[in-house]
Amino acid sequence: MAPDLPPAPKGVGKIGKSLSAAATRDRLLQATSHIIQTQGIERLTLDAVAKEAKVSKGGLLYHFSTKEALIAGVVQSLMDEFDADIDRELALDRSPESPGRWLRAYVNATFNGKPLPTTLISSLALVATSNPDLLELVQSRFDAWQQKISVSGLDPVRANLVRLAADGFGDTEMFGRTLPNAALREDLLAMLLAMIQEAESGDIRITK
């Protein structure tokens, strides 16, 4: 079950003048996510979001003029949060000069990040399949991540195998299917990190 939105800051009524523009935008996106999770995306309307966020209709339209813009905003926010997770992992990396640094951070962010609500992800994925603009938004971010790997100097076959495995793990977790136990999860993470180290050395032999 999706958590309720936090109470609006003191002094925020229908027009919400005490909220900054950034805080208002964030609150609208939280309200959008909350409605999708609790009521379904078919119940998502501008009026419903404004009411849930305790923001005036005019305040909502200042940031998001359509329902599609709200949905795109949620998708953008989720991808930005994952990029922030990657940045946090980069700051913790013990080999900051190694070519596998970014891919390690990507894998660790995938395994260590907060699981996303299944209802939210499945609803957004369904919308993306029939919305070219939203699909392009997602694809452009994936292209940017792929470019990070392509210019890293890692063996491309091994590096992309690691990325695809991490993506598969992330997708599996998002849709509520976890590994049998925590030990297997840790072993899988260790294996992927070891494969990154191998990709750094370039010592890989493929028999055709």
Image (cartoon, rainbow, N blue to C red):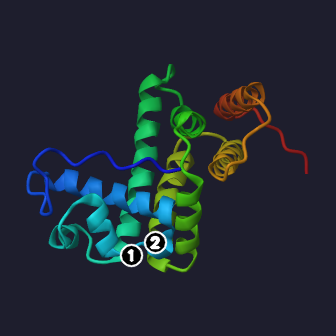
Name the quadrant containing residue 180.
top right
Q: Which mark is residue 68?
A: 1
Above-or-below relation of 206 to 105: below
Residue 18, x across and y down, in percent = 9, 51
Q: Is residue 129 above or below residue 119?
A: below
Can you identify the residue that label 2 sits on? Answer: 134
Q: Quadrant of residue 60?
A: bottom left
Element at label 1: helix
Left or right, 182 with respect to 101, comes to right
Left/right placement of residue 169 relative to residue 74 reads: right
Tell me which amino acid carries mark 1: Glu
Point out the residue furthest to the right here. 208
**Of marks 1 and 2, which one's residue comes earlier in the chain?**
1
The disc labelled 2 sits on which kind of residue?
Answer: Leu
Q: Residue furthest top?
A: 94
**Position of residue 19 measured from the top left corner of the image (x, y, whole percent):** 14, 51
